Image (cartoon, helix red, strand yellow):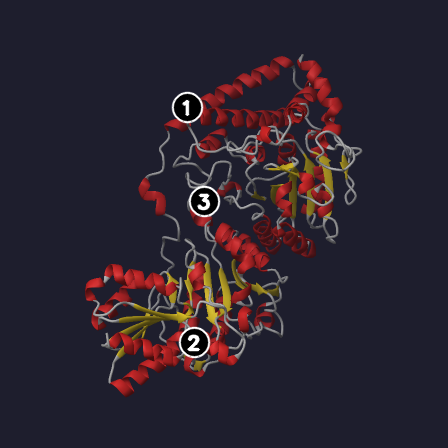
Amino acid sequence: MKDKHRKKTAQDREALLHPDPGHGNGHTSEATIPGIAYAEDLNVDKLTAGDFDGKQLREAYRTMLLARRLDEKMLTLLKQGKGFFHAGCAGHEAAQAAIGMYVQPGHDWFCMYYRDLCISLSVGMTARDTLLAHLAKANDPSSGGRQMSQHYGARELNIVAASSSVGSQFLPALGFAMAVQRRGEDAFVYVSAGEGATSQGAFHEALNWASRIKAPVLFFVQDNKFAISVPVQDQIAGGTPYKLAAGYEGLKRIRVDGTDFFKMAAASRRAIEHIRSGQGPVCLVADVVRLFPHSSSDNHAKYRSSEELSEAQEVDPLLLMEMTLIEEGVLDVHAVEEMEQEIRKELDEAAAWALEQSDPTPESATRHVLFEGDLGIDYEASEPTGEPMVMVDAVNAALKEEMARDEHVIVYGEDVAGEKGGVFKATRDLTDLFGADRCFNSPLAEASVVGTAMGLAASGYTPVVEIQFADYIWPAMQHIRSQVSSLRYRSNNKWSCPMVIRVPSGGYIHGGLYHSQNIEAMFAHFPGLQVAMPSIASDAKGLLKTAIRSQDPILFLEHKALYRLAAARTPVADENGYLPFGKARVAREGSDLTIVTWGMIVHKSTHAANRLEREDNVSAEIIDIRTMLPLDMETILASVNKTNRVLIAYEDHEFMGFGAEIAARIADEAFALLDAPVRRLGSAFTYVPFSGPLEKAVLPQDEDIYIAARGLLDY
């Protein structure tokens, strides 16, 4: 019976994987692919069992078998109430095991997705590692129980801790490849996904940039014809990701039957040789089958017919590999059964061992959100006694000093390089001073800028990237939240992402709806990110230098209206001057009223405070918080304790602005000290209009702050 099933497998697999139009399962209109691969761009030689030694083939088969039995073991544990989630690799094993024969663990880099069990085993992870992750144990090497199971990670093997966001791995993978190029290595980056992920814009952004710079990336698309329940014909124009990848000059493509280990090995070997030789990226599309539901939370019988599910089992790559190895004399039935028994025993023992391991302690739940060590910075080394400069020059000076200090600091973004030096000139001269490899222009794609910076940062560089206007950061928000800010936490401190995202923000420049936004409240909600907004030149220089030395991702907001404002022009410290994050500045001493503020409103509050003193004999203290994450509540509360009245003034919408958090904290921690309610003053809950009179009506003005302060004093 088993032999008959194997014969049917060999006969029917082409028709099932690549059906003609009108075939029963109707997944794609692509006709049967002739030969071992549809390889328009790269010629692929044929490989057979005779091209490998027996040990290699037995090891590959064993890895495939181990992956399959591990999937089954985890599903069994789930049914027993042990574990929380499972996403299976079954049907993808041959494709992954074949690539695994040509990788170099610890030398190459791996940005995997949740079906990459077999390749993770090929690279060096173990069954115990997988079961620890499945059971969310404290010593789970992928995440310490913080991330869902099947999200593989191993620092020593260069397997990057995975995010769950579909397609978010493509651009970080490109960043790792850029780091490989900078080091002059022959390594490559493996990044994989299902066919559904190729609908994401990040896939196309990564293909574009990688093709342009000949990045050493293998874009491995495992096309099992379903993105959860959505069939490929509802997902992809042309029915295959292979066609989507056409048109990128410099990108080579291969489409291959991923259920056939030998065809897959031939395609993998050719692709990886091409990449390692410096000839650029390859998009390798493997047609595979998904033998299990999308995940343990899915029931694929609701959208796949019983006939189709039966047909999928008939192209099982594990059975095909077993049949071939027996036919070639590499294995016999006895050896297969012996290997089965050995693996089942290994997994029973591994599961019993894993179940006995400790769960994470509740106290550890909030660990490793941020770097917990000492940056080794002497914040008292230099006072701001140098020549006064405007804020944009202070930013430029900080970049020059830090790039001179550390050759791993690199600057890129839209329009930052060459004579242009940024639309505000903050990056002028950097290309001339440090070369085009350390200050360069990126494509106009914010997700690409931030996503690649994550890979560069995680592999040893310190990227300082610029988003030209805060209003255009939103395409990058996915990567800031899903990749950048959570990397340390989701890897249980195995990986870090030290990078700076410089963002000109704010209004008062007649910029209209799309050049005036304030974004600090939105991003201050992201654990693992630090957020700063200086209001004077000395703070801009000192905080930016510290940001570049940080071990965490920093969102560094630079108010556009302050770049050349005379009031923000101050003396700055020399190259040894650094300022700590989380330490507010008392911008003006006072005793009757506290104004807590930041950015442009520091200066408007100063105008209002001067008027209060001149006209009303009132002494107002101004606290410039400088950083939202971390927030210096100690300085704020000390001021409230002195004045007993507090106004929080800021440029963003008053409704749901960052001032609401400060107000809540004051009410919670200093209620008994207050002689009046905490008052907020922000912009109207509307967009910032272009017209001068309209902009003035929406954004807080000196008069508004004065009136709000007077109201508190009169309470």
Of residues 344 and 221, the one nearer the viewer is 221
> Circle 3 sits in a helix, a strand or a loop, which is it?
loop
Percent coordinates x, y for residue 564 in the rendering: 48, 80
> Circle 1 sits in a helix, a strand or a loop, which is it?
helix
What distance separates the C-alpha of mark 1 from that of mark 3?
A: 25 Å
Tell me whether the residue at label 2 lies in contact with that at label 1, contact meaning CB atoms closer than 8 angstroms: no
Residue under the image location 21 percent in, 70 percent down: 675
| Residue 45 seen in the figure | yes
Side (left or right) of 172 relative to 555: right
Q: Quadrant of the N terminus?
A: top right
Percent coordinates x, y for residue 226 in the rendering: 63, 36
Q: Amino acid at mark 3?
A: Ser
Q: Quadrant of the C terminus?
A: bottom left
Vertical side of 345 occupied by 111: above or below: below
User: Around disc 3, counting alpha carbons within 10 Å, would you say few (fewer than 14), some (14 to 19), or many (20 or more)?
Assistant: many
Looking at the image, which residue sits at the far left?
672
- According to the picture, the residue beneath numbered tag 1 turns out to be 352
Dividing the picture into quadrants, the one containing residue 582 is: bottom left
Tell me whether the residue at label 1 lies in contact with that at label 3, contact meaning CB atoms closer than 8 angstroms: no
Residue under the image location 25 percent in, 78 percent down: 590
Side (left or right) of 642 relative to 700: left
Q: Amino acid at mark 2?
A: Ala
Q: Amino acid at mark 1?
A: Ala
| Sequence-first disc among 2 and 3 | 3
Tell me whether the residue at label 2 lies in contact with that at label 3, contact meaning CB atoms closer than 8 angstroms: no
User: Around disc 1, counting alpha carbons within 10 Å, would you say few (fewer than 14), some (14 to 19), or many (20 or more)?
Assistant: few
Percent coordinates x, y for residue 404 in the rendering: 51, 68
What distance separates the C-alpha of mark 2 from that of mark 3?
A: 37 Å
- According to the picture, the residue beneath numbered tag 3 turns out to be 491
Percent coordinates x, y for residue 632 in the rendering: 32, 64
Vertical side of 493 occupied by 610: above or below: below
- According to the picture, the residue beneath numbered tag 2 turns out to be 537
